[in-house]
Amino acid sequence: MSKRLTDPQKTFYGTNGYILGLPPVFTPQQVKGLNDGLDEVMKLLRPDEDSKEIREWHESSRFLYDICTNEDILDYVEDILGPDFYLWGSNFFIKPPRSNSTVGWHQDTYYWPLEPKISATVWLALDDVDEQNAAMRVIPGSHKAGLLKHSRSSATDSVLTLECEQGQFREDAAVSFNLKAGQISIHDDKLVHGSPANLSDRRRAGLTIRYSSTIVKCDLSVNPYFKTYLCRGTDEYKHNPVGTVPTQNYARLERKHISVEEAGVSAERKLGLVK
């Protein structure tokens, strides 16, 4: 039986690849605590780093681990992925006011050496997010198209170098992920999405949290640093390394991060993404 989502909501997710309009997971007072914690984590960055480096720090900071394993969030994810799933990724995406930085159209699954492709991302808003301060935009139903062609480009303001090639979907069908602080959205790993520049006077901060079914295996030859944390159920497959729950409230994660993009063309070729 469902724990949080209604049958129509689950049907909508299956058809469109995302879910919006969920009640807030965190109260305004709790959101203040989340932002206070973010301030503490940001203090751990080195002078040449920005918030994008706060990636998989749930492995080192109990503050972030506790957010990622929040029971209300896990209830929603269980309704989508089923009773057996693990946490493996987290990343802050923060666009300061008047920032030209964009995120080009892409599919998350293109970046991840994971098979089969049964993963979901929770986007937790730490600020109110709308079209004015660069809310994420998605192409409904694009997760059903399979893996689209991506190409490398450094001639944009996008934080990504791998983006969907044009002409594979209708950009005018895009839906904006407007959220109040404390709300979450959830989207399928194959859903095409991106975000524009933040030309407003307001910050746009969100934490993405990645979960996968226990049947999903990481190609450790591409990312040997991959760690999982079982959130619900059992892991009868035992495909992946298991991480250690952190004990320090705020701590850096001192290790490399390897996606398909970071591993380069050789990884894309190995995974059959290029010839």
Image (cartoon, rainbow, N blue to C red):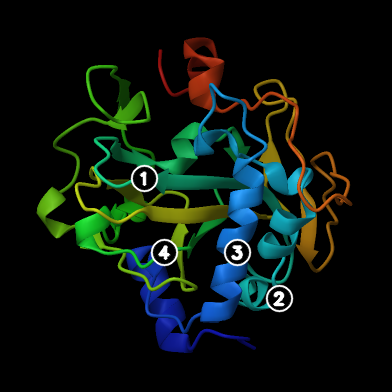
Say which amino acid is labelled 1: Lys
Residue drawn at point x = 53 percent, y = 10 percent: 266
Give residue 168's position: percent from left, percent from top. Answer: 19, 40
Residue 127, visible in the rendered structure: yes
Q: Amino acid at mark 3?
A: Leu
Q: Are marks 1 and 2 in contact (CB under 8 Å)?
A: no
- Left or right: residue 15 versus residue 112 is left
Marked residue nearer the N-terminal end (2 or 4): 2
Whole-percent x and y of residue 114? 61, 38
Residue at figure coordinates x 59%, y 51% from the top left: 39
Q: Which residue is mark 3?
A: 34
Report the residue marked by disc 4.
Answer: 127
Disc 4 versus disc 3: distance between alpha carbons?
10 Å
| Residue identifier under label 1 | 95
Q: Amino acid at mark 4?
A: Asp
| Contact flag, marks 3 and 1 (Cβ < 8 Å) | no
User: Residue at the spot x=57%, y=33% of the render?
Assistant: 53
Residue beneath the point at 45% across and 42% down:
108
Q: Earlier in the sequence, mark 4 or mark 3?
A: 3
Tag of residue 275 = none
Residue in the foreground of this view, choosing between 265 and 64: 64
Query: Which residue matches tag 2?
Result: 71
